[in-house]
Image (tube, grey):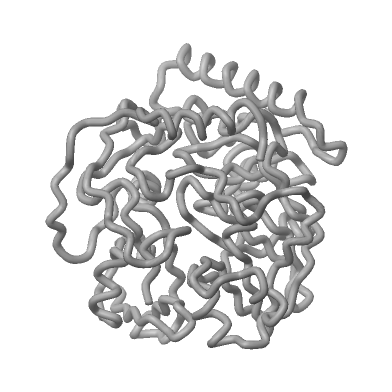
Amino acid sequence: MILRSSFALLGLVAVVALAVLRVAPVSHHAAVSASPGAQAGAIAAFKSLVKQQSDLSADPHHVRLSTETQGAKVDLGAIQQGCAVQDCIPAITKPQFDSAAAASRWLNDGDVVFGSSYGGVQRAYPQRILNWHEIVNDVVAGSPILVTFCPLCGSALAFHRTMDGHTVTFAVSGLLYNSDLIMYDRRTGSLWQQFTGRAIVGPAAQRNERLTEIGITTTTWGAWKRSYPRTQVLSQNTGYDRNYDQYPYGSYEQDNEIYFGIQHTDRRLPLKAVVYGIQIGGKSKAYTADLLEKRRALVDVIGGHRIALREERSGTIRVVDVTTGHAVLSLRTFWFAWATFHPDTELAGRTTFRPGPTLGICPGPSCRASRDRLLQGSL
């Protein structure tokens, strides 16, 4: 069973019109090629934005976001404010867990969960909780683990949360790059890109640090618990007063609008088509959920590596390098996010999609209302 939407159940009709964003496609190295005056202006604007985010934070434990721009890995002028202040979306730092039986009292079989099997321990992190927190700082089988979800990109990733030999707590900066969550660490205030696990601003970026990714599966609660009946489940007892039965982003997952600008658009698929992206051998390729649902298993070549993709009972898309037998990580996400971070990506199969009329960023009233709630307040 391939999940076509990050929140809604299977069978949703695919969106048929792709927004052409009013953002000029630019290189990811735009900051390097810009004129000195433009670079100085972008740096000044970035520092002002970051200072504002930190000044207004109400979290007494927060570390100020770093403004050390030397060694920055992205175009600073493309970093945007996603919500009002630093820590506007509260990360979970002391997670509690329910048994599968207890969780089934409040989780439905069709609810989306992010499943992790690490060190002999299975855990499920419900999307209905991560929508409101985006980051869980966990310890699994004695290892510090970071579980992340960006609702705007539909991307769930997990990492070892160690930096420069230290265990680090991560939280939400309130900033975005390419519509994706920018995290920060509470040791140095460095900014980290969720989609890549890479430090992009601050001391960690100057050291070229990147978090080590571990596998995580986007699936349904029903499929996960059938495969792992003794799984633990992130509890609703998070320490925060949130309505975890409510989706806080309106019709975002069903419509064809995005809240914030991106640097590269690709019109081969609808904006929010669900894809599984793979990077190997210096190349990237995306496979639509529709294709994998039809094929169930397939063999392909990416960057000179012969790989095999197969769906498991748990809903995991297992990818293996056929030559070495080593597992290859894949990322389930919206097409716009994969394509903007991988502008040279290949796309498996043929598409009959034809781009619809030109739209803008967040043109509809529902989209604007949801975005404004983020910018003016917090979740």
Residue lying at 78% horizontally and 45% vertically, measured from the top left: 186
Q: Residue furthest top?
A: 37
Residue 81's x, y, as percent?
57, 29
Give the image quarter of residue 48.
top right
Residue 141's x, y, as percent?
75, 78
Residue 326 lies, with reference to residue 275, above or below; the image says below
Residue 350 lies, with reference to residue 67, above or below; the image says below
Residue 224's x, y, as percent?
54, 79
Determine whether, in the image, residue 306 is placed left or right of residue 370. Answer: left
Determine whether, in the image, residue 200 is placed left or right of residue 325. Answer: right
Q: Residue furthest front?
A: 105
Residue 242's x, y, as percent?
71, 49
Residue lying at 62% horizontally and 51% vertically, measured from the top left: 134
Determine whether, in the image, residue 106 is placed left or right of residue 33. Answer: right
Residue lying at 66% horizontally and 30% vertically, measured from the top left: 377
Q: Nearer the viewer, residue 142 or 260?
A: 260
Q: Quadrant of the C terminus?
A: top right
Q: Quadrant of the N terminus?
A: bottom left
Determine whether, in the image, residue 102 is placed left or right of residue 14. Answer: right
Q: Nearer the viewer, residue 246 or 23?
A: 246
Residue 284 lies, with reference to residue 304, above or below; the image says above
Residue lying at 30% horizontally and 62% vertically, measured from the top left: 285
